[in-house]
Amino acid sequence: MGNTTSCCVSSSPKLRRNAHSRLESYRPEAELSRDDTGCNLQHISDRENIDDLNMEFNPSDHPRASTIFLSKSQTDVREKRKSLYINHHPPGQLRRKYSSCSTIFLDDSTVSQPNLKYTIKCVALAIYYHIKNRDTDGRMLLDIFDENLHPLSKTEVPPDYDKHDPEQKQIYRFVRTLFSAAQLTAECAIVTLVYLERLLTYAEIDICPANWKRIVLGAILLASKVWDDQAVWNVDYCQILKDITVEDMNELERQFLELLQFNINVPSSVYAKYYFDLRSLAEANNLSFPLEPLSRDRAYKLEAISRLCEDKYKDFRKSAKKRSVSADNLTVVRWSPAIIS
């Protein structure tokens, strides 16, 4: 009890005062510059909010920043609507199906289980708008992505290969071939688009006719390894693209990772934002997901999932009730869990 030492010693350093410190007068010390202290740390008042600065430019990192492909597609969508309005042309046959009392239409695409075919179509459309509405400010073209320096086939690259923008169908066929041969999932397609926009933002480059194939290939290669448990090896892509070498694939992956600053994390909020923005892009371009009437078997399945959710949250609902409420005026809160699959 009388010992000066104690077993409860704080590990953090604290400022200790001696018995005569209160009698000493305050002596202001001379201000020392950063050079004198040997510390070149930036003062907190000089620092800028990094999150606020990168919010607009890094949509692949921040869920509140708008995606690049959706903003680049707005110009074309407005022009299409303006042209239809001026020429008094109807937007075409009404293909949208609406639910009624007797029939309920649902699509089979959810944020947890997207439709593979239509997700690839949407991703190809997003890449198409990236190429079509790219910046023409003379951004540099990295050699690793240049198809003339690193061709994907033995066929000779035409002299004007970098002058003609690819069509959406050409981009879709290229992406679909890789996904079909490697048996990749629809979620991997969304992550591919996230990595593609992250590369364009971090490396400050643009996707153009000369480099779009190798950029998309690198994004798919990385997304398949990050997302899928049983990833496709680089040598497997050499079986799909017969004329490419393993060394070229390894170098493409290495430089892609370096340009991403090894940031391969995709938060769930960012993933969900890209999924719903792809759905908005599809709806704006009349590329709606297929709707089918709700069948009896699927209705039973949804009902079973709903019952499981009710049992799961039953205890939580009981704990959420206020004990101070009178039994005469007790109202039970009804929970309606969302069904996403």
Image (spheres, helix red, strand yellow):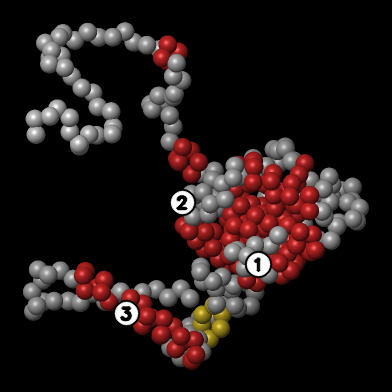
Q: Nearer the viewer, residue 251 or 319?
A: 251
Disc 3 target residue: 311
For image coordinates 60% across by 63% down, the residue present is 228
Q: Quadrant of the N terminus?
A: top left
Vertical placement of 190 versus 254: above or below? below
- SS category of the residue bearing label 3: helix
Residue density around tag 1, few if under 14, some if 14–19, many if 20 or more, within 10 Å = many
Identify the amino acid type marked 2.
Arg
Number of dots carrying numbers: 3
Disc 2 target residue: 64
Identify the amino acid type marked 3.
Asp
73 left or right of 178?
left
Determine which of the numbered discs, if any, sits on residue 160 in the image.
none
Residue 127 can be seen, yes or no:
no
Write down the quadrant of residue 335 in the picture.
bottom left
Q: Position of residue 262 (x, y in %)?
A: 59, 45
- SS category of the residue bearing label 1: loop
For image coordinates 37% across by 11% down, the residue present is 32
- SS category of the residue bearing label 2: loop
Nearest to viewer (mark 1 / mark 2): 1
Disc 1 target residue: 184
